[in-house]
Image (spheres, rainbow, N blue to C red):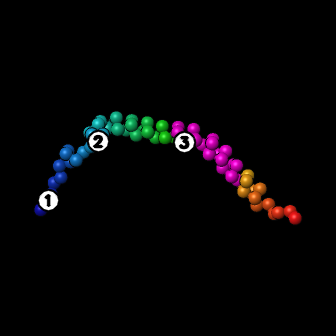
Amino acid sequence: MQTFINLKKNVKAEAEQSLTKRCALSVFRVVRAAAEYAEAAPSQLAESFNDIKSAWIESQPKKS
């Protein structure tokens, strides 16, 4: 016995959009995410550098 599922009633509104629009939205979301990451990268690099610098200083043997 075969069971058929009516996909139309289970489809979200976004999935009903044209393929071109869905692809464009996906590309734009990736580009926006990359831009947000690029904005955050310099501060993250500076923080990482400061962490590495402080770890280097802390690793030095104590002078008596």
Work out how far the residue at label 1 is from the one at label 2, CA to CA, in angstroms. 26 Å
Q: Quadrant of the C terminus?
A: bottom right
Q: Which residue is mark 1?
A: 2
User: Compared with residue 22, is residue 62 higher up or lower down, i.e. above or below?
Assistant: below
Q: Quadrant of the N terminus?
A: bottom left
- Residue 35 percent coordinates (x, y): 53, 37
Q: Which residue is mark 2?
A: 15
Q: Earlier in the sequence, mark 1 or mark 2?
A: 1
Circle 2 or circle 3, nearest the eye: 3
Q: Earlier in the sequence, mark 1 or mark 3?
A: 1
- Residue 55 percent coordinates (x, y): 72, 57
Query: Which residue is at the front of the view, 28 or 54?
Result: 54
- Residue 26 percent coordinates (x, y): 40, 40
Specify the segment rendered in magenta.
35-52
Main secondary structure found in the magenta portion = helix
The residue located at (66%, 49%) in the rendering is: 48
User: Which amino acid lies under the numbered mark 2 shown in the image of this protein?
Assistant: Ala
